Image (tube, rainbow, N blue to C red):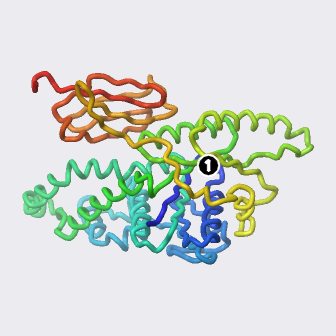
Amino acid sequence: MSRIYIFTGKGGVGKSSVAAAHAVKSAESGKKTLLVSTDMAHNLGDIFETDPGKEIVNVLPKLDIYEIDPQFVMENDYAEMMKYLTGLMSKAEDLSLQDMGMFPGMEELFSLMRISDLHESGKYDRIIVDCAPTGETLSLLKFPELLSWYMEKLFPIGKVAMRVLAPVTKTFFRIEMPNKQSMNDMEKMYLKLVQLQELLKNREVTSVRIVTTPEKMVIEETKRNYMYMNLYDFNVDGLYINRILPQDLGNSFFDRWISLQAEYIKNLKETFSALPIYEIPWYDEELKGADNIRRIVRDVLVNERVFTTVITNERERFERTEDGYRLEISIPGAEKEKIDLFQTASDIVIRMGNFKRCIPCPNTLRKHAVSGATFEDGVLRVSFKKEESEV
């Protein structure tokens, strides 16, 4: 079974170089490896000094690289669905998808679906993903759960609406409802979304690794990144501190920078003590070309333990208590006063800043209401009791 390693972090911290170093080490240890970029500003081709285009290309023995073009994936793998959407837009608004560009989030969705297909193919032992900066990565990883939640709520209604409204919309509004093939494509997408959720949150398959630098603003974003990754139940099992200045530069200009970096590195080690931490020096030349990338391999990735999965926290769980049930979610680094929690008919909704997650309640809790919540030691605990009217 393929293993997936996802590298994320603030823009400009060196994610691509760190991901590329892992890919080179993996390939040179005999594992068939694919290095994938989901960042629309691809630079894998620059690192390996080649032009991969829209397809997978080989750059070293046992190492392929792939700069995903979601538009290309969408048009080739989901042609029927896109044909319907294009027709709908052109008739309703005198526009096409080419005029509008992709719908928000579609790039992330089709990139992930392509990675899922490659994982299922079994062609590669390891798939290493170089992601876009933090915000886009969070959008990428949470999108399958978010969209499948909406589709689960609307898909049965959509099938009924298609049967009932198709003749009406065609006669009075001259808008075509989705045909059977288009609905099949949408259903196929929904099933893919369910598979994606399981794939990305399977701790035996997928690891998320965070790349950072010893700078105050970057560290604060790194902490938020880790917090949100845990909110959405991803297993973060590695921290890479990049661009560390050497201690013996012998130049007084850098003394203050070296002192500040030491302070920030200490902060990172204290905050992320539960994770394996790797320190990467600031090299004296650009890390371009496989030979220069190997410098990270020789200096930092010295053994195969870098590919070992470390499960840093349990998945969210519901458990029986004496007077009801309890939901536990690990959110290290969160601030209690910034967590909003509320219950809908079928979900528990957690909001932190601009991010919101809906957690479906098991059927056994449909007649239970939230009776309280606590947040201690980085763990949110939500208690449920059976509603009195139902006792």
- Whether residue 225 is situated above or below residue 388 in the rendered picture: below
Q: Nearer the viewer, residue 147 or 235?
A: 235
Instruction: Give the residue at mark 1.
Output: 211
Residue nearest the observer in this picture, 51 or 188: 188
Tell me the crowding category of disc 1: few under 14, some 14 to 19, or many 20 or more residues within 10 angstroms, Cα based: many
Q: Nearer the viewer, residue 273 or 109?
A: 273
Looking at the image, residue 121 sits to the left or right of residue 368; the answer is right
User: Percent from the top left, x then y, of residue 295?
Assistant: 75, 61
Residue 352 on image: x %, y %: 42, 33
Q: Amino acid at mark 1?
A: Val
Quadrant containing the C terminus is: top left
**In screen coordinates, is 48 left or right of 368?**
right
Asked if residue 20 lies left or right of residue 294, the reply is left
Instruction: Name the residue located 47 percent from the left edge and 47 percent from the top edge.
Output: 235
Q: Residue at x 75, y 57 (%)?
A: 299
Q: Which residue is at the front of the view, 2 or 73? A: 2
Query: Which image quadrant for residue 73?
Result: bottom left
x, y percentage for residue 354? 43, 36
Residue at 56% across / 37% down in the picture? Answer: 223
Find residue 256 and report its horizontal and vertical position in percent: 83, 34
